[in-house]
Image (cartoon, helix red, strand yellow):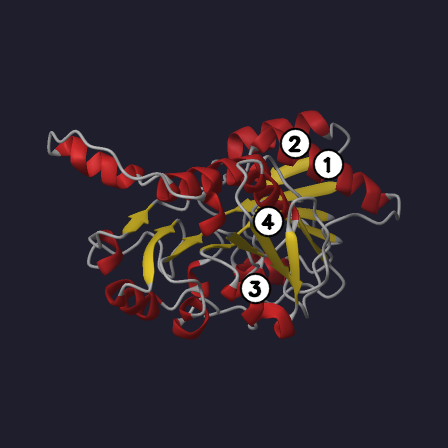
Amino acid sequence: MRIAFCCTDVKAGPWLDELRAAVPDAQVEEWQPGAPPADHAIVWAPPQQFLDEQQQLKGIFNIGAGVDALLKLRLPAGARVVRIDDGGMAVQMAEFVCHAVIRHFRELDVYADQVAQGKWGFRTPRRRADFPVGVMGLGVLGARVAQAVAQFDFPVNGWSRLPKELPGVRGYTGAEQFGEFLAATRILVCLLPLTPDTENILNRDTLGKLRPGGYLINVARGAHLVDADLLELLDSGHVAGAALDVFRDEPLPPEHPFWRHSKITVTPHTSARTLREESVAQIVRKIRALERGEPVAGVVDPQRGY
């Protein structure tokens, strides 16, 4: 069995070492143009040339949570694209979102500004019941986030394409309940996959349906958000602020207004990073299963986009 590693902007050496140790009976090599045909590939943002050359692939394993960029390429016929179910990202995402929710709810940015000015003062405590959190997307990451936020006694709403039942989370399903979900939400967390149906879903209309003083946390993809619409709603006061970890152009261009807006917190796409050891173990289990002809979790439906 031959496994090709083709991950743009990823240091290959540590991945190759762990893969070779985990699959000693396989040939594991970093892809170079003209390389021999491989049975499986481990990829992140591979060039089209790689996929054109590797037409016999059985499985293409994406080391990140999102597969939107990969699905824009021409894929080998018959190859299955497989997502990492977690790879250590779910707990990181839960940490990040809980921190963002609590930082906004407890007005910690206001305290930081006061401290910077040498001021000592207190804010009036706010009621959690007045800050319902809505999580868009209840996959592996979204479900973990929703349940983590619920542990802090916030009302939590969840919206997904298909019905999902999670303890402590009020579920909303499909387009027919989307407006109701937004109207019941004050802090909105986007964890949707990026597909043609979800691109630009965070716009003037949807964000305008949030409760007054809404707050946006986007940790999914930058293309979910219409940047100009968010800026307009921030300036009108209907949206109180935003924590943005993902952007249409990354790195975020220096001239972008998000950098300097007083109501926006910017982080460099770091809410959840793939953990190599956990990801290698999961990928190897799935490769073994595919080789035995067994079903595996995380196979992407190209029509749905996830």
User: What residue is pinned by disc 1?
Assistant: 284
* Of pointers 2 and 4, the one earlier in the residue sequence: 2
* Of pointers 1 and 3, the one earlier in the residue sequence: 3
Look at the image and tell me in which quarter the C terminus lies.
bottom right
Q: On screen, 73 above or below 254?
A: below
- Could you tell me if the residues under marks 1 and 2 are in contact, i.e. CB atoms within 8 Å? yes
Q: What is the total number of numbered labels drawn onto the structure image?
A: 4
Pick the residue in front: 12 or 298. Answer: 298
x%, y% of residue 138? Answer: 63, 53
Left/right of residue 98 with respect to residue 268 in the rendered view:
right
* Of pointers 3 and 4, the one earlier in the residue sequence: 4
Of the residues tagged 1 and 2, which is closer to the observer?
Answer: 1
x%, y% of residue 195? Answer: 57, 67
Residue 88, located in which quarter of the rendered image? top right
Categorize mark 4 by other alpha carbons within 10 Å: few (<14), some (14-19), many (20+): many
User: What residue is pinned by disc 2?
Assistant: 19
